[in-house]
């Protein structure tokens, strides 16, 4: 199973400050295997960088990435949107996608 992690949950989990739900904590505490991945978006990493530079959170990007490298279960991904057009049906829509940009080894 793949889980896209919420920025606030990442900050609270890695800092140990604030509460996260039991289910969220169990996801963060999952053992490494070939089935499970914890995905963190590049946007979340940018938020962590910004908030730490403004001294609004007790962790910084370097510490977060260091903690993520401990376990190969984490994967940094680019989350984006692409426009899909179908001329036959005369419709178009936006579809989200995940593009792995970094995977711990």
Image (cartoon, grey):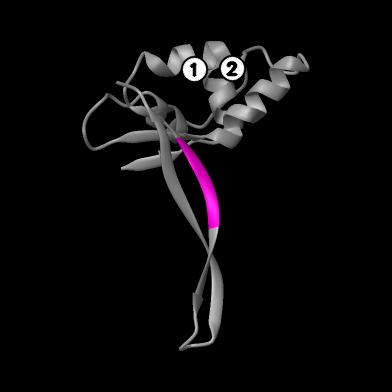
Q: Which quadrant, please, contains the C terminus?
A: top left
Q: Which residue is located at x 59 percent, y 17 percent?
A: 61
In this rendering, the count of numbered labels is: 2
Q: Which mark is residue 61?
A: 2
Direction from residue 51 to residue 2 in the image, left or right: left
Give the magenta-colored segment's residue range.
Answer: 77-81
Residue 34 position within the rendered picture, expressed as x and y whole percent measured from the top left: 21, 33
Q: Which residue is drawn at the image coordinates 66% and 12% (left, top)? A: 58
Relative depth, front residue between 82 and 13: 82
User: Is residue 78 in the magenta section?
Assistant: yes
Residue 56 in which image quadrant: top right
Magenta segment's dominant SS is strand
Residue at label 1?
Answer: 65
Circle 1 SS class: helix
Viewer-closest of 34 and 17: 34
Marks 2 and 1 sit apart, C-alpha to C-alpha, by 6 Å
The residue that appears at 44% across and 27% down in the rendered structure is 25
Q: Residues within 10 Å of mark 1 (few under 14, many from 20)?
A: few
Residue 9 in the image: state x and y as whole percent: 56, 29
């Amino acid at each position: 199973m793949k889980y896209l992690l919420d920025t606030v949950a990442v900050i609270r989990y890695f800092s140990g400050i604030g509460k996260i739900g039991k289910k969220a904590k169990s996801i963060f505490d999952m053992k490494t295997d070939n089935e499970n991945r914890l995905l963190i978006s590049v946007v979340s990493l940018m938020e962590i960088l910004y908030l730490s530079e403004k001294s609004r959170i007790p962790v910084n990007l370097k510490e977060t990435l260091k903690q993520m490298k401990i376990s190969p279960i984490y994967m940094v991904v680019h989350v984006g949107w692409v426009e899909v057009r179908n001329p036959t049906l005369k419709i178009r829509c936006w579809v989200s996608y995940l593009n792995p940009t970094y995977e711990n080894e």
